[in-house]
Amino acid sequence: MRTLLNVCNGRSICILCILATMIKYISSVTAPNDSETHALTLKARTLAGMTSKTRTTIVQKRIAHVPTLTSLKRPVIPTEFGAKVPTNIRQRYLNLFIDECLKFCSSSQEAFDKALSEEKVAYERSTSRNIYLNVAVNTLKKLRSLVPNSLPSVNSTYCKTSNRKLVSHEAVLGGKLAAKTSFTLNQSGSLRAEDLTGAALYRRLKEYLLTEEQLKENGYPMPHPEKPGRAVVFTVEEKKAIDSSCRVCCRCGTEYMVSASGNCIRKEECLHHWGRLRKQRVPGGWETHYSCCSGAVGSPGCQVAKQHVQDGRKENLEGFVKTFEKLPTADCCPGIYALDCEMCYTKQGLELTRVTVINSSLKVVYDTFVKPDSNVVDYNTRFSGVTEEDLENVSITLRDVQAVLLNMFSADTVLIGHSLESDLFALKLIHSTVVDTAVVFPHRLGLPYKRALRTLMADYLKRIIQDNVEGHDSSEDASACMELMIWKIKEDAKVKR
């Protein structure tokens, strides 16, 4: 035994090997009886178990799994010279669209195709960078709403897995007496729903009413001091008529001659720009272009009409009616309405073809087509959305509309609109309790510049309106004005609190 240990000295041997050698050596020296054999076997098994627990194991280094399938490369927006929207902005929103589409599409290729399609539509609908950003944000919200909600609700999961007694939010805030006590939470910067209806909304809107000076400054029709039924405009300079048969086209600026009945003596095509002049920053200063075709000032028109037309509304100031005082109602709210009118060109100028009135709940309370008094020469469908077919069987006249509105409105009724003086001229209605979104949200350069309603909705409510090539929708424009003022009231309330 001593010789064996000396031979193995300095070497790393297993305890099990030593045990086996010991058993073999003992068995060779003496022949044990059955009890001794059983004890030795038990001892050997115990030592073997201890040895197995102390045996070391060499762990191989883990190797990361590399997928064999290659992922599809994301599409890239091609770079365009002079693009209306920078390529990096388009690419950023395309990536966001892809991320959302991957959540509900069955394959990556399907997600890429849908995201590309949505981004292309957003780009084609936009005329500028700001408009694109608004459209892209709305598209992103739409895609997020398509993602299926597979997660169970918190309340249902809690009720199924727990038998504990539920504690209400009121009990946490108010303690034991909360169940017997009624109280409200004072949330700073927010208005309750009841604060934006009825008399409460009326009181808040009174802060935005135009003053008499603002009414005159913005060209609203005012009652003539001496002649009932006639209006006066303080922004129009009285011009001595050199020739009563001479007119100036309000679209192209060309002078043309008319007969005593108002018809053009000579048929001439009207070549004009239908867009507005807009200033654009360029290296070294500013340039002015038309929004319709980006043509410079003085460039030939991009639109051809059959004949020249005139505005004529501020020249014909007869036939106006004025809202009058009425007894107060039970709820002390004289009424809150938003309205919008559409007009067409007749031989006498612009005349009313449609009027829409909505209430503070954004519900249409009056909407009708109107038959013009004079013969129509241009339906102005690009802006009005009214076609010849819409007015074929219409018998309602301006006088009928005036009667309805005088019954609906009182002198204290709040009327909301965008450049509302234009609508009041079309209605031949004198009313001074007005809220004009063009004044509430003024242009940074001041009058005579005004921000378009489409721009206001895109900037503040992140929504696109007037995007239909078939023309404007008067109910959409009226609702937009009401929504803008409700948003304005909420925002101003945050500042005041």
Image (tube, rainbow, N blue to C red):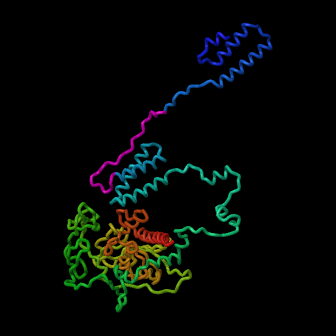
Q: Residue furthest bottom?
A: 226
Depth check: 365 or 338 in front? 338
Q: Quadrant of residue 16?
A: top right
Q: Is residue 279 left or right of residue 188?
A: left
Horizontally, residue 445 falls left or right of residue 50, namely left
**The image quarter in which residue 272 lies:** bottom left
Q: How many marks?
A: 0
Q: Is residue 79 above or below residue 290?
A: above
Q: Is residue 476 magenta?
A: no
User: Considering depth in this image, is 191 or 432 the residue closer to the camera?
Assistant: 191
Residue located 55% across and 72% down the image: 194
Instruction: Pinpoint residue 56: horizontal percent, then vertical percent.
Output: 60, 25
Residue 361: give x, y in percent of width and height: 50, 71
Q: Which residues are magenta?
A: 64-87
Residue in view at x 44 percent, y 35 percent: 69
Residue 18 location (% of width, % of height): 66, 15
Residue 354 seen in render:
no
- Residue 63, image x, y percentages: 49, 31
464 versus 217 height, above or below:
above
- Residue 66 among those drawn in magenta: yes
The answer to which of 49 and 121 lies nearer the viewer is 49
Q: Please tell me which residue lies in front, 362 or 441.
A: 441
Name the chief secondary structure element in magenta. Answer: loop
* Visible residue check, residue 416: yes
Give the quadrant of the N terminus.
top right
